[in-house]
Image (cartoon, rainbow, N blue to C red):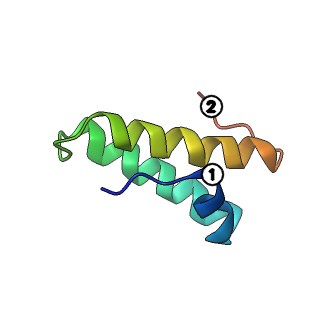
Amino acid sequence: MKRLTKQEVKDLDLTDREVRIACERIKRDYSFGLFNDRVTPLQNTRLLEDELRRRGYATGS
């Protein structure tokens, strides 16, 4: 998994629903142990959740 930057998350121009789905998929795959790298998925999830917070949505974390 490639590490995202804040600018890349903004440039993706995802809908709120797509951002939430991406967060959930990363968390699910992480919990199943599908990632060799433990740091990047967490960083990407945090960036996506920050984007949701910026848009005014609670992320539940």
13 up-or-down from 10: above or below: below
Residue ID for mark 2 = 60
Q: Quadrant of residue 1?
A: bottom left
Q: Amino acid at mark 2?
A: Gly
> Dot 1: within a 10 Å radius of its alpha carbon, few (fewer than 14), some, or many (20 or more) residues?
few
Closer-to-camera residue (42/28):
42
The total of numbered circles placed on residues is: 2
Mark 1, secondary structure of its residue: helix
Position of residue 54 measured from the top left corner of the image (x, y, whole percent)? 79, 45
Give residue 32's position: percent from left, percent from top.
20, 41
The picture quadrant where one finds residue 18 is: bottom right
Q: Secondary structure at mark 2?
A: loop
- Report x, y in % for residue 42: 41, 36
Quarter of the figure with the C terminus? top right
Spatial CA span between label 2 and label 1: 20 Å
Residue 6 numbered tag: 1
> Hey, what amino acid is under mark 1?
Lys
| Whether residue 5 is situated above or below residue 58 in the rendered picture | below
Q: Looking at the image, which residue is at 33% across and 45% down? A: 28
Q: Residue at x 67, y 41 (%)?
A: 50
Find the residue positioned furthest to the top. Answer: 61
User: Can residue 14 be seen at all in this image of the molecule?
Assistant: no
Is 10 in front, or is 60?
10
| Mark earlier in primary sequence (2, 1) | 1
Instruction: Report whether 25 appears left or right of 53.
Output: left
Left/right placement of residue 14 relative to residue 54 reads left
Any part of residue 43 in sight: yes
Residue at left offset 59%, top offset 62%: 8
Mark 2: few/some/many CA within 10 Å (<14, 14-19, 20+):
few
Is 54 or 17 nearer to us in this picture?
54
In this rendering, the answer to whether 35 lies above or below 7 is above
Question: Residue 6 location, x and y as percent?
Answer: 63, 51
